[in-house]
Amino acid sequence: MTFLIMSPEVVCDKICELGEGPLWDPTRKLICWVDILKGHIHEWSVVSEELNTIQVSQMIGAMAICNDGNYIAAMKNGFGFVNRETGKVDMIANPEEHLPENRFNDGKCDPYGRFWAGTMPIAEDKSSGSLYFLDTSLNVQKKEINIGVSNGLAWSLDHKTMYFIDSPTRQVVGYDYDKESGKLANKRTAIAIAEEDGFPDGMTIDHEGMLWVAHWGGWQVARYDPVTGKKMLSISMPVSQVTSCSFGGDSMEDLYITSARKGLSKVELEKQPLAGSLFVVRNSGHKGFPAHRFMNLT
């Protein structure tokens, strides 16, 4: 395994309580991410170096860009559309209206334009979360149950495997993935995370089919081979609670990394004052893919 001596740069001075879900918008040249607990979507222009913040007035776990340029989001009260110009939220469905102690966490669109997002208990005290699938006709299906902290999603280069993280398990699992129906089968462990490396959180995939995993409590982003389970390299971070990562930039070689300060003590924050920042490793030497868009038909 290689430990890369890269110096992640702070992108801007915005500090999040629980930053998550970095997403590159190539059309507008924006890096977008959420602050889950504050209900914020942040958009940073790499051209003008200006920050725009959209307030959705509820916790927001994840968002993706729709084919009309607006957002689809997984929020405390379910799935909804967010207008990027006005901030108006139009809710679609709440599959966990009966579970007010839960909230949505990480989510991502699959290669066929459907939105996947999972839930978790706000108290993080049980496995009451589930993984859901919102299709292009806005129908919701439950795909997995008994999840502690639903987190990273990625699809293999041939789109035949879906990778998923339930953080407390310290595993990245793989499923056989049916592209027509979104059906999952043959669950197996692809990567086991060492205890000293913390918990796997968000992730992305690169052009070689390797998975990049953010380590909550692990001070790093690491690159893994999902076929062998081997850790290929690790990027040391100046913060402990590394939450997710995604490629962006004109060449898709800049690695954007989110982090959190939630739950850190005063002493810990003094040691890691950048906790909650958005970072970038420029020209990482590896290349990612543009995020899939939600292909809403309505």
Image: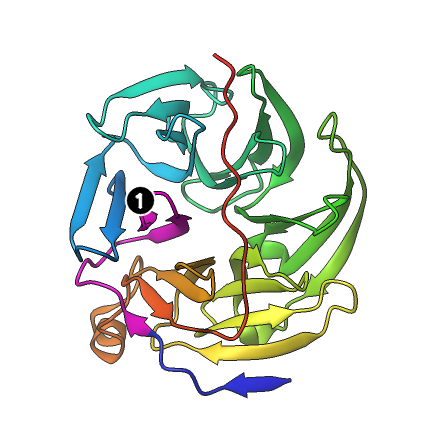
The N terminus lies in which quarter of the figure? Answer: bottom right
Which residue is rendered at x = 38% and y = 51% of the image?
20
Looking at the picture, tell me which residue is in the foreground, 264 or 156.
156
Please tell me how crowded label 1 is: few (under 14), some (14-19), or many (20+) other residues with Cα within 10 Å.
few
Indicate the quadrant where residue 213 lies. bottom right
Indicate the quadrant where residue 272 lies. bottom left
The x, y position of residue 89, in whole percent, is 29, 22
In this figure, which colouring scheme has been used for the structure? Answer: rainbow
Above or below, 31 against 292 in this view is below
Looking at the picture, tell me which residue is in the foreground, 224 or 37.
224
Above or below, 260 against 56 in this view is below
Q: Which residues are magenta?
A: 9-34
Which residue is rendered at x = 22% and y = 56% of the image?
47
**Residue found farthest to the top:** 298
Indicate the quadrant where residue 78 lies. top left
The x, y position of residue 154, in whole percent, is 61, 49
- Horizontal arrangement in the rendering, residue 293 relative to residue 280 (left or right): right
* Disc 1 element: loop
The x, y position of residue 53, in whole percent, is 19, 42
Which residue is rendered at x = 63% and y = 26% of the image?
142
- Horizontal arrangement in the rendering, residue 47 relative to residue 131 (left or right): left
Callout 1 amino acid: Arg
Q: Is residue 14 magenta?
A: yes
The x, y position of residue 79, in whole percent, is 43, 24
Q: Is residue 199 magenta?
A: no
Q: Which residue is mark 1?
A: 28
**Residue found farthest to the right:** 186
Above or below, 89 against 289 in this view is above
